[in-house]
Structure formats: C-alpha cells, structure tokens
Amino acid sequence: MDYDGSDRVAAPVAVKILVAGGFGAGKTTLVGSLTEIQPLRTEEDLSDAGTLVDELAGVEGKQTTTVAMDFGRIAIHSGLWVYLFGMPGQQRFWFMWDDLSSGTLGAVVLADTRRLADCFPAIDYFERRDTPFIVALNCFHGRRFPDLDEVRRALGIEARVPIVSCDAREGRSCRDALVVLVEHAIDALTASAGGRY
C-alpha cells in the first residue's frame, strides 16, 4: 500500500491515454506492445461488405479491424496505473470517440507515413477538443522516415505539438512516445493554468 505520510492510505491514481490514428496505422499493435495485462481487443475479420468502405491501399495484407476499442494497462507503481485505449480508425466507428476520450490526459496519434492523410480526422478531433496530443510516426518494415519538419508542414500542426518516430512493435519505442506525450500534456496543463502547477 502507498501512504501519504499520515495514517491515511493514498488513493490510487489512474491516467487515461488514447491511441488514435487511421485504419491500419498500428494502434492495436502499440497497445499490445505496452500493456502488462492481456489486452482487450475487439477485432473482427474484414468482410466483403467492408471492402466497399475500407481503403486498403498500402495495407493490402490487413485482415482484421478494430470495431470498438483496444484496452491495456501499465502499472507505474502500486498506486499509479496508465490505462490505454486504442480508438477505432474507420469513419463508421467515429461515433464512439466522444465516449472514449472522456477524462483523458492526452492522445498519441499514430501515423503511417504511407497514408499520412488518414490521421487528419484524429488530429482535427483533438485540436477541436483542446486535448494534448503528439504525432508518432510508425515505422513499418524498416521504412525510412521523412524529415519531421516536412511531416509537420504536411499535417499543418503547430510547432508546440511534438512529432516522434516509433515502432509500434517495440515496447521501449512505444514507451518513449508515451513519455513525450505525458510531458507535453503536463506542459499544456501548466500553460493553461497560468503556471500554477
């Protein structure tokens, strides 16, 4: 148990982080790489009907899709947990975004550089809600990353929004992206509170 220095037991703290991005960007993989528990996945096989609405260019080998969310948990210590929620990327599931984003500290927008435009809806969503977010460029099969300034210009995001490289298959790489997000979210909260934190 954690104690706060008195006879009281310190209340546990939970932090909620979202993982967003386009269809096939690697959100399910990222959550699975980080979680310390068995991840909750709501993946279903792509159907023939779905091929009419799911754009598979660049991800032709993809056979499943997230239909609700992915969920994982990381224990920082006995009184602090990080809850990870992977948001569905396809437009027909965007109606769930408001519920999933309630109470979040911030979001990692995972971007596939082969399909960069697919992360625009998530970026727009978090900008409109004034939710701190970072953009994480997912490494696919050793692809070389473009210049980060070029990506920033292409996405039209402000200089204050961090852009990082990561590999959704590697826990350490994903953890480093989460650290950047948490630092960015703390900076944003401090700035919005006029430096009172």
Image: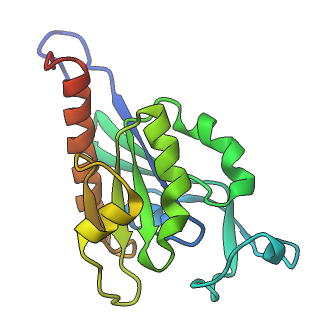
Above or below for 73 versus 38: above
In the rendered view, does 50 fall on the left or right side of 55?
right
On-image quarter of the C terminus:
top left
Q: Nearer the viewer, residue 13 or 137?
A: 137
Residue at horizontal 51 percent and vertical 51 percent from the top: 122
In the rendered view, does 113 fall on the left or right side of 38?
left
In the rendered view, does 188 fall on the left or right side of 5?
right
Give x and y (percent) for residue 63: 69, 81
Residue at horizontal 20 percent and vertical 43 percent from the top: 183
Q: Nearer the viewer, residue 64 or 151?
A: 151
On-image quarter of the N terminus:
top left
Give x and y (percent) for residue 164: 26, 64
Give x and y (percent) for residue 50: 81, 72
Residue at horizontal 36 percent and vertical 43 percent from the top: 82
Q: Nearer the viewer, residue 70 or 27?
A: 27
Q: Nearer the viewer, residue 6 or 65?
A: 65
Residue at horizontal 24 percent and vertical 75 percent from the top: 147
Above or below for 69 versus 194: below
Observer able to see residue 94: yes
Residue at the outermost right position: 49
Above or below for 166 versus 183: below
